[in-house]
Image: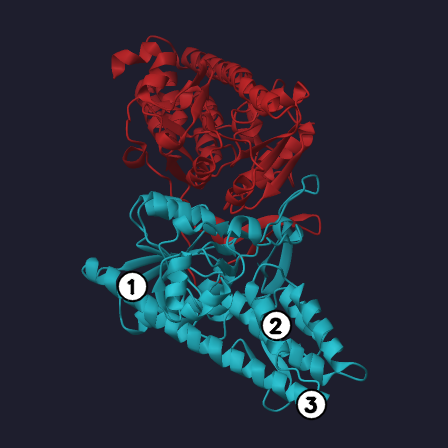
Chain colours: A red, B cyan
Amino acid sequence: MSHPHTIWINETTGIVEATDQRWLPFRNDIFQIRTLDDAYFAIREMVVRGAPLIGVTAAYGLYVAACNFEEGDFSGYMSEAGEYLKISRPTAVNLAFAVDEALTHVCAEYSPEENAERLLAYAESLKRREIEYSTQIGCNGLELIRGISKKKGGSVVNILTHCNAGRLATIELGTATAPIYLAYEENIPIHVWVDETRPRNQGARLTAFELAEAGIPHTVVPDNVGGHLMQHGMVDLVLVGSDRTTLNGDVANKIGTYLKALAAADNQIPFYVALPSTSIDWEISDGLTGIPIEQRDPREVTHMVGLRKGQIAEVQILSDLSPAANYGFDVTPARLVTGLITERGICQASKEGILSLFPEKNIRT
Amino acid sequence: MSHPHTIWINETTGIVEATDQRWLPFRNDIFQIRTLDDAYFAIREMVVRGAPLIGVTAAYGLYVAACNFEEGDFSGYMSEAGEYLKISRPTAVNLAFAVDEALTHVCAEYSPEENAERLLAYAESLKRREIEYSTQIGCNGLELIRGISKKKGGSVVNILTHCNAGRLATIELGTATAPIYLAYEENIPIHVWVDETRPRNQGARLTAFELAEAGIPHTVVPDNVGGHLMQHGMVDLVLVGSDRTTLNGDVANKIGTYLKALAAADNQIPFYVALPSTSIDWEISDGLTGIPIEQRDPREVTHMVGLRKGQIAEVQILSDLSPAANYGFDVTPARLVTGLITERGICQASKEGILSLFPEKNIRT
């Protein structure tokens, strides 16, 4: 039933559709993106999430906006649409990247219809690019897992991951999970510790769901547990994704990632970040001061959605007398990152490391 | 309505009663401890929790057991009762301490009734001792907060705490919260970041409840957030309790404490542990290898209790297809602990530090 991709064009209706990730694994719905507002809502409310998928969704959102153009200044209309989408979520850099790149395809000489076609072509090409990047990240990261497996004499490789940097954060295969899927296909014995990832539980709800679907051995743990596991030799590798990585190698990722990086460093466990170059912010050098950290509705902390008697139900888990805060991301300083796994290979989390793989970006710096 | 203490003898009925902490803050029940099994259940199922309160509950449990003695070898019966209680929870050392100390008051020359009286007297004296220790810890820790407040020119002192080391973990005042209550009484501007503390949410459910009752400004955050707060200067002091502290200063506390200690060290933020000497294990030197870490029912991870339409309700938050693990505690190595706040004063988290405050223990080592 479910589509192999996370976003697609319905072949019958031509409507942009996406897997609605809000109720997974308990309900597997499809969300239709018919208007710019739908795209904004889908990103803002996390119908879709994950940096690469947010970027692709924004590109489709601009296509949909172009289709709905009525009259007036088309270029101005599209610029406004782009600015609107950009504010839907602040941290993932893929969003701004996709909007800006998409808009370079808008050309005043063409009709709105032709521009819509061009924007669709861009969205599809970005989608293909992200699929390709995931595959390449998978191949590059697989080498790491192979190496650890060999070192351990073939005994189980334990990988800890935080949040969801899987198929559901991308188009297919994922970023942090891509090497895991490939290792599993290659019959390397692996086991994944899945951080629950409060407050929205993307680990427990999405990563665990993906891994269970694929048959990959895994165990969900509260976010508090990783340090203990690392202290006791139960983690061989930490693999996470990134919402925005600065040119100096600082990594913004789901809140709590920094704590796992600290524990990995304290226990001499390799901590790798898997990311396509579309998640690199080439403009910012200091992640801690430069990357905007989203604050979301405290209701995500005070209430919890789950299954009750077969139905989706929500319970309040914090008394009305206590306020809550909900920071979406944190920044792991480059010094705590063992390496970045990109589509072009693995590099050090540093300007030198990143530019060694992406020398064409050197002109900008 | 609620009793000022967490465990007490009902003055009318003579029955041992305790605040049932399982459904707080949504329901405030009283739990009766009429039998040894009730005491075992109360500790095991976390009707009561927190190292000092577990110790006092065990002492009352032995009194109740003595009251229920029917015939045979009283001393053997009491020893068995003690061993039974000891296995109810493995990590808090107060449990074994209270059982062993209580049993030194059992004397074969006295009748079971007289022994029951002696055990009650012991339980009451241990309870008074824990109250006194909390007060002294509060006074000693208050100095720290005063110092930070002065250094900050009177602007708000932000304290982060994990789990519940409050009134509800003790008899009154708490351990980690004791200095907070006293600082608040002294009108020092403070604000407490309360870690939610998955999986059982003792922070969100108990610490937040306590602080709200007392009117102390606080904000609940998911366990993932503390590192980000510390990176951005939003935490001046980390204050936690302890379930067992070894003679060398290693601290077993609620799972996730170690991650906060790492973040505090990485950001040069003082990390203090407040504990009565009844939580010190004088026999173990290496906490990481020596302290047993409880593994609890994965259901605490896979399900979440909260309020729904005014009633306590439970939702399933993890699919049946994914297993979960539930480690109750972790060990923070002494090197990450700025100091221990005890009833006798503040010391370094080291054998030298601890023995400087408790020189009478030197003979044992």
Mark 2: amino acid: Asp
Disc 3 designates what residue?
A: B110
Quadrant assignment for the C terminus of chain A = top left
The amino acid beneath tag 1 is: Ile
Location of mark 2 (residue)? B100
N-terminal of the two: label 1 or label 3? 3
Do tags 1 and 3 sit on the same chain?
A: yes
Name the foreground residue: B355 vs B195. B355
Q: Kindly indicate the quadrant of the structure image that contains residue B162.
A: bottom left
Q: Find disc 1 in the rendering and name its residue.
A: B145
Crowdedness near tag 1: few (<14), some (14–19) or many (≥20) residues, C-alpha within 10 Å: many
Chain under callout 2: B
The local secondary structure at tag 1 comes to helix
Q: Amino acid at mark 3?
A: Tyr
Q: Nearer the viewer, mark 1 or mark 2?
A: 2
The number of callouts visible is 3
Residue drawn at 41 percent across, 20 percent down? A278
> Could you tell me if residue A6 is visible in this image?
yes
Mark 2 neighbour density, 10 Å: few (under 14) some (14–19) many (20 or more): some
Protein chain holding label 1: B
Q: Disc 2 and disc 3: Cα gap in Å?
A: 18 Å
Q: Considering only order in the chain, which callout, 3 or 2, is on the residue closer to the N terminus?
A: 2
